[in-house]
Image (cartoon, grey):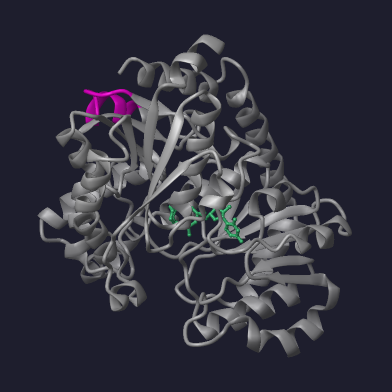
Amino acid sequence: MEKIREVAKQRRLLLVPCPYQGHINPMLHLATYLHRNGFSIAIAHTSFNSLNPNRHPDFTFICLDDRLPDDLVASLDIAKLLLAVNDNCKASLKEAMATVLRDVVCVIHDEIMHFCGEVASGFGVRSLVLRTNSISTCIARSVVLQLHAEGRLPLLDEGSSMEDEVPNLYPLRYKDLPVSAHSDIYQSTKLVHKMHDLTTSSAVIWNTIPFLEPSELTQIKTKIYNQIPIFAIGPIHKISPTSSSSSLLNEDSACLSWLHKKPSNSVIYVSLGSVARLTNHELQEMAWGLVNSNQPFLWVVRPGSVRGSDGIGFILEEFQKKAGDRGCIVEWAPQKEVLAHSAIGGFLSHCGWNSTLESLSEGVPMLCRPYSGDQRGNSRYISCVWRVGLTLEGHELNRNELEKGIRKLMVEEEGKKMREKAVDFKRKIEDCLRENGSCARNLKELVDFIMSF
Ligand code: UDX
């Protein structure tokens, strides 16, 4: 390994994350791992959701000129915004690669940042794609593309068949397909087409764990991407455990002191990730469901996550009086540390893929409340395949259903079984990270692959 590190030292890699939290985190974990293995690291990021170079003094940061208009940044149409990022950042990246990034030997870019592959190949530089979703999401997206080609989208037009299972896609129903709630169908399928086009890629790095989706991995390796290597190196947040935070918001660590005072497995952690937004009504239902459950809770209410209000402001008074010390509310938590805390007994989650892997890695069972995109599919795997959680179905969040769900997960026999299963997953994941485990092996192969360029 020392020898590899010595040779790698002369090699500079350029990593380009997609500018959203759930994509930035895995890319920066990968960057830290590769840096520890001797590579020199440059990170190119957009000015939208730009990164803080001071947190990562070992890396060189290049800010790409994204020229995003304010109204697009403010809109909820993420697909449109990301297509604009792909169009607008090309020139800036080209210029950087012709000058300050001339010595880059390989580009690793988020699958969404498709333009990087095109620019890299123009300079004769190899590029690798990082996928931050599950393999099953990728397969489900192919189905969405097919439905679109057949003129069957938006799916809502099909009425009752939304509940049907999609053929050959167990456990997903039509309503679980990764169709964005906020983006125009034309824009989002255009983006997915780009994400699935691997003509400029030499390999795919996947933040998944082979034992979680074994048949999906085989399917993708043999039928879909059989021309290029796939490195399933997840869970990526565990490959560089002490890497510094890449949070766009400040983490409120005070909640850890609050957790220290709570009994083991007693607290339900509540977080809906970095993008999902609640209505005021849902916020109230959630607040009263939490209070009525009588379980201690740690709740993340992200600024701007409640439509049409400042969110936390309205709940503070009346609700916090009722919750007392049984509830702790923060704007952003150090989630990985929270999930690893012995006081946490359950996770009420939107089921983003990072949150899912982070929860499984700590043996925490989940109460799923998915919002959009891949989250519904992830929640189906959590509740129907891995059986480490249960899903709150229904269009509207309801305080009684939430209260029941929390009690089931935290105190009833059903939840106890899920916790045992989740702890089993934690052990299996630890095995993957050990020498000769899937993660360690695939990472080594990835490093060897990059060294072969
Ligand atoms: C969306 C998609 O749902 C997800 O599947 C995709 O891979 C990325 O975009 P997002 O809302 O960002 O997800 O959720 P998630 O994937 O769970 O990522 C959120 C990240 O933010 C996690 O790494 C989590 O640890 C972190 N986080 C969240 C915090 O550090 N603190 C918090 O308070 C909440």
Q: Is residue 130 magenta?
A: no
Q: What's the residue at 46%, 26% (across, down)?
A: 39
Q: In this view, does 231 lie to the left or right of 185?
A: right
Query: Can the viewer see residue 104?
Result: yes
Q: In this view, does 300 lie to the left or right of 30?
A: right
- Position of the N terminus, as image quadrant, is top right
Q: What's the residue at 51%, 55% (across, down)?
A: 52
Residue 190 screen position, x and y as percent: 17, 56
Query: Can the viewer see residue 385?
Result: no
Q: Nearer the viewer, residue 45 or 340?
A: 45
Residue 3 screen position, x and y as percent: 51, 9
Residue 155 screen position, x and y as percent: 24, 65
Question: In the picture, residue 40 is in which quadrant?
Answer: top left
Q: Is residue 182 left or right of residue 411?
A: left
- The span picked out in magenta is 218-229
- Residue that extends furthest to the front in the rendered view of this protein: 99
Q: Nearer the viewer, residue 68 or 54?
A: 54
- Residue that extends furthest to the left in the rendered view of this protein: 150
Query: How many numbered marks are there?
Result: 0
Question: In the picture, residue 103 is in which quadrant?
Answer: top left
Q: Relative to residue 260, is residue 99 depicted above or below?
A: above
Q: In this view, does 58 lie to the left or right of 15?
A: right
Q: What's the residue at 57%, 32% (across, down)?
A: 239
Q: Is residue 219 magenta?
A: yes
Q: What's the residue at 39%, 54% (across, down)?
A: 374
Residue 163 screen position, x and y as percent: 35, 61
- Position of the C terminus, as image quadrant, is top left
Q: Relative to residue 397, is residue 35 depicted above or below?
A: above
